[in-house]
Amino acid sequence: MRMDKLLSTIGYGSRKEVKQLLKTGAVLADGVVIKDGKTHVDSETQEVTVHGEKIEYREFIYLMMNKPPGVLSATEDLSQPTVIDLLTPEDAVRDPFPVGRLDKDTEGLLVITNDGQLSHQLLSPRKHVAKTYFAIIDGTVTDEDVAAFKKGVTLDDDYLTKPAKLEILTGGDPSEIKVSITEGKFHQVKRMFEAVGKKVTFLKRLTMGDLELDADLEPGEYRDLTDEEVEVLRNSKPADFV
């Protein structure tokens, strides 16, 4: 990779800013000063330093965010804040994107990455990767609703959903539930409850595949996934209820 691209990719500024940095002699590869941005370097075999500090280049970035309400699961929007706006410049410069979407007023687990292959693996309908949510429901959720979700319910556009796993945590009105689905239709969980005559008043995603939301993350906070967590995502098994 060209040195100027390497430096700009990991957050050292625009190509113009990187060019100025290189002119200062602050960038070394294996102890040799590099002033020409066109110089090719291998970040895996060569040691690159800036002002004496070793830099590390990762092709892919994997982040876990506890998405807050009021923020769009999108890469950009002209009028509303997005989850990418919550990232540091060093992370945002890697061109990451949210894996799937959470509604604007929904919070919880959101994976953000620039690994398109992993994203496809998690979102492909044929993979049947489950997403589990906690919800508060205006209305009394019944065993009949559990049975209906197990078969799949018909949404307002006549779409029959794939089977979903519904668990009643607290009965009565309102009810607290957990629900797992393998699809990502627009407002799907809300529309599924509307199909059985009830309304979602709070929704939070807890898991994606076999990855669980870090309970220590406050809404709006995020962190890098560990290597083990990335492997957990990659090896997520198909849901057993589909």
Image (cartoon, grey):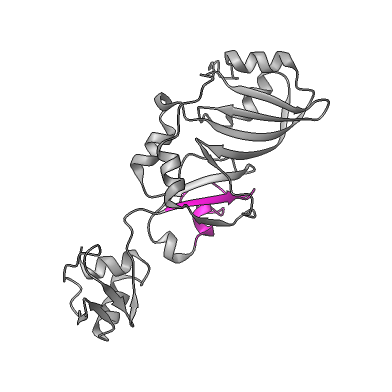
Q: Disc count in the image? A: 0
Q: Which span is picked out in magenta?
A: 62-87
The extreme bottom residue here reads 24
Q: Residue at x 19, y 67 (%)?
A: 41
The extreme front residue here reads 228
| Magenta segment, prevailing SS (helix, strand or loop) | loop
Viewer-proximal residue, 204 or 19? 204
Q: Is residue 46 a member of the stretch shown in magenta?
A: no
Vertically, is 184 above or below 230?
above
Viewer-proximal residue, 156 or 174? 174
Q: Quadrant of residue 61?
A: bottom left
Viewer-proximal residue, 234 or 77? 234
Q: Is residue 73 visible?
A: no
Vertically, is 31 above or below 228?
below
Q: Is residue 194 visible?
A: yes
- Of the 4 image quadrants, the one containing the N terminus is bottom left
Viewer-proximal residue, 97 or 43? 43
Q: Residue at x 55, y 51 (%)?
A: 65
For residue 169, side relative to residue 207 (left or right): right
Q: Quadrant of residue 198?
A: top right
Residue 102 lies, in percent from the top left, at: 56, 40
Vertically, is 206 above or below 39?
above
Residue 72 lies, in percent from the top left, at: 55, 47
Q: Residue at x 68, y 25 (%)?
A: 167
